[in-house]
Amino acid sequence: MAHDLYAQHIEHLDAGYQRALEATGFDAVVVHAGVPLPKSPFDDQFWPFEPVPAFAHWAPVAWPGSAVLVRRGQAPVLFAHREDSFWEAPVALDLPLLQAGLTVEVVTDDAPLRRAVQSAGKVAFIGHEQATAAALGVAPEAFVPAALLAQLHELRVTKTPYEVECMAAASRVAARGHSAVAEAFSAGVRSELDLHMVYLMATEQDDHQAPYKNIVALGAHASTLHHVDYGEAPEAGSLLLDAGARHAGYCADITRTVAAQGGGDAARRFRALLAGMEALQAEVVAKVQVGLQYEALHDASHDLMGRLLVDTGLSRISAEAAVETGLTRVLFPHGLGHSLGIQVHDVGCRLTEPRPENKFLRNTRTIAPGQVFTIEPGLYFIDALLAEARAGAHADSLDWALVDALRPFGGIRVEDNVVVLPEGSAENVRNLTREAFE
Ligand SMILES: [Mn+2]
């Protein structure tokens, strides 16, 4: 990654932190990386270390106990905490990159940070443990103050060019995995675990390095939105793969659905539905516009879904009626997408609640340049939701014979990650996913 982009990112972040400190009345803040968290209080196993997201925003450093100290009017300092232990070797640090933006002190205990905190005035702490804050001399009321945290979340809503490049790199890795899995599926692999392993091999990630547990769903398994209980499905005619990758702490979150060749009439109908969903998803991406509410985009995707249900013969009522009666929500029950960054479901984009019928929508922001979010419409044959619809007042609005014929294919989701470009750009978005597949 270009060092000048990282330096710009830190400059931007520091300016935002300076404003946040001033607005909340603190002289400084310790942004602590955290520590490995225990899996259970009854066991001595720990989860793989995940740095506190606010810390990862500053530095791609997976060293537990590290911290960034930001003081008003002073350059931010990274205290990189190297654990000298014969049990585990510390992961490699990209020092030249870090030093392009930050003052870096490699330390082996907390003493240097504690000394700096003690002469920094009123200091806030962002991190896992109250005890760690107290040991540094931070007052109890300055432990993760809500007003400051809200300002720091706000800084994560739009991404710097450095962050966008990290996500583009993550997308290229994930696209490699998706292509390899699609090939394995086409070659006849019908074990979800094997397909999962193909993905990890192709992306050179261990399971815990992926941003979330891969959803690998053959056939009817795709009707479970988060299918991670892998099995086999020798006859499956479809595969839904929702799998990502990370680069320097930043995520890609990609879903593709593939259909097998051949089969009978139902398989043909499913392939037509898949093509329709792919076109629908591209149409929604094309509608992204600065100033539009993300929720309005979600609503637009339901309007398009109403049309698709009519065109494919699933719906016996008009496109408008399919939206009004809630039919589109039987088949597409989740949100259109979410903000993406250090966290797969990134912070700061659901400050207001969506309307009740959109309760699972994770993004209610006004679309603005620099935001990165997913566009991921889906269409599924979920037994519980279909049973409810069949028992309801609008049971006649679906072609049940077609529904039953398509159930073995589970469902479809198509998910891209897009960066909103400034108004007046040649394109409305930079589609990180499409470019990664090119
Ligand atoms: Mn997603």
Image (cartoon, grey):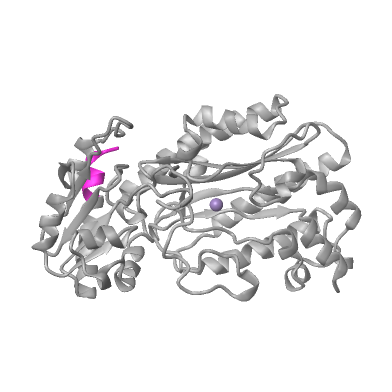
In this view, 145 is above or below 287: below
Q: Quadrant of the N terminus?
A: top left
> Quick check: 221 left or right of 54?
right
Residue, x 65% and y 72% (percent of image)?
357
Q: Residue furthest front?
A: 42
In front here: 285 or 348?
A: 348
Residue, x 26% and y 36% (percent of image)?
93
What segment carries the magenta color? 1-8
Residue, x 75% and y 63% (percent of image)?
330
Q: In the rendering, at what x and y percent does residue 406 appear?
A: 82, 47
Main secondary structure type of the part rendered in magenta: helix
Q: Is residue 96 magenta?
A: no
Q: In the rendering, at what x and y percent does residue 47 appear?
A: 44, 44
Q: Is residue 6 magenta?
A: yes
Q: In the rendering, at what x and y percent does residue 221 appear?
A: 73, 45
> Quick check: 295 left or right of 36?
right
Q: Residue furthest left?
A: 119
